[in-house]
Image (cartoon, grey):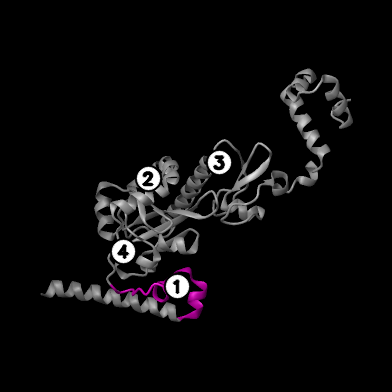
Amino acid sequence: MGLNSGMSNTLSDNKQTHATRVFTAIESKAAAATSMVAASWARSVRLHGLLPDGARPTERHGQSELSQRQERLQRVLHVSGRTLDRLYSTIALSGCGIFLCDSDGVVLERLTSDGGATEFDSSGLSIGADWSEASQGTNGIGTCIAEGRAVSIQREQHFIASNIAMSCMGAPIFDAQGALAAVLDISSCRADIEGPVVQLIAQAVSDAAGQIEADHFCDFHSGLRILRGAGDRTRSPVLLAVDADDLVVGATLAARKQFGLPLRTDFTPKPASDVLGDSKARGTGFESAERRELRRAIARADGNMSEAARALGVSRSTLYRRASKLGLVN
């Protein structure tokens, strides 16, 4: 009785200590206002009705539901393969696992070692498992969804006491319309994953999520010209899709924010020069448009005016006359 009873009492004490810490933080208005973790703890209690010391078995979706979810995310799953393999080769020896989840927090794909798979299964991180905040409280997947940004949830920062052995780093992946499509997460049950190691892993997750988002955007807008802008510190891709008429017809979420385009919805195509802010330098009238077209035709023909005229469907004399008027030839 002594050993089993002692272990049971220790686990019970740990759960109670964790619950006390959670409720103390929730009751502190300052903590909830300044701490992302405390705000998530508050949502877990007040919005989702969870208890930090309560037993909470992980909800798992059946194969039929799982297949439907995988089909909805098929384009992201398709383009993510190489990036996930490269990421796993980087962290494989650390004992971490990689989890790709949909926007509801359901695990759709997992990369772990054989030994790690058993450990993650026992922790509830298996294919089809629901790791939304509504299901598991504060965690690297669900809280990433709730916050809409990359998060790192370390051990005791988890809401439910049975999850505090884990460290989880999650980053969002947005679709071509700027809406949240998926979450990429790296989790570990090792106690020595902390400090600088966590920062390195969190950065690797954000980089990989950004690459998958960029690959998905380029795949979605296949055949169009993709303009790349300067990214911000979150490593979110700043991409614009431009059609044959030089109109911006698509933009990543980071690009929408940077260039003042509508967020998370389709938008009316806009001239690339207007979006990029160089319309004044380029000119906006018919004459400016004609000048750009003539310059492109002459450049394509390597300065051969006869060849440029044939490409434009006009006579050589007409091309010379128009080009002279626009100052393109002497």
Q: Amino acid at mark 1?
A: Ala
Above or below: residue 315 compared with residue 13: above
Residue 302 picture location, percent across and down: 74, 22
Considering depth in this image, is 321 or 115 the residue closer to the camera?
A: 321
Specify whether residue 267 is in view.
yes
Q: Is residue 49 magenta?
A: yes
Query: Considering only order in the chain, which callout, 3 or 2, is on the residue closer to the N terminus?
Result: 2
Dot 1 and dot 2 residues touching (CB under 8 Å):
no
Q: Amino acid at mark 2?
A: Tyr
Circle on res. 177: none
Quick one: SS at disc 3? Answer: loop
Task: Give how far apart the Cα atoms at labels 1 and 4 are.
Answer: 18 Å
Q: Amino acid at mark 3?
A: His
Query: Considering only order in the chain, which callout, 4 or 1, is on the residue closer to the N terminus?
Result: 1
Task: Give how far apart the Cα atoms at labels 2 and 3 are.
Answer: 28 Å
Task: Give how far apart the Cα atoms at labels 3 and 1 are.
Answer: 40 Å
Residue at 40% of width from left, 66% of height from top? Answer: 133
Task: Kindly indicate the quadrant of the structure image that contains residue 196.
Answer: bottom left
Task: Give how far apart the Cα atoms at labels 3 and 4 are.
Answer: 42 Å
Circle on res. 221: 3
Q: Which residues are magenta?
A: 28-54
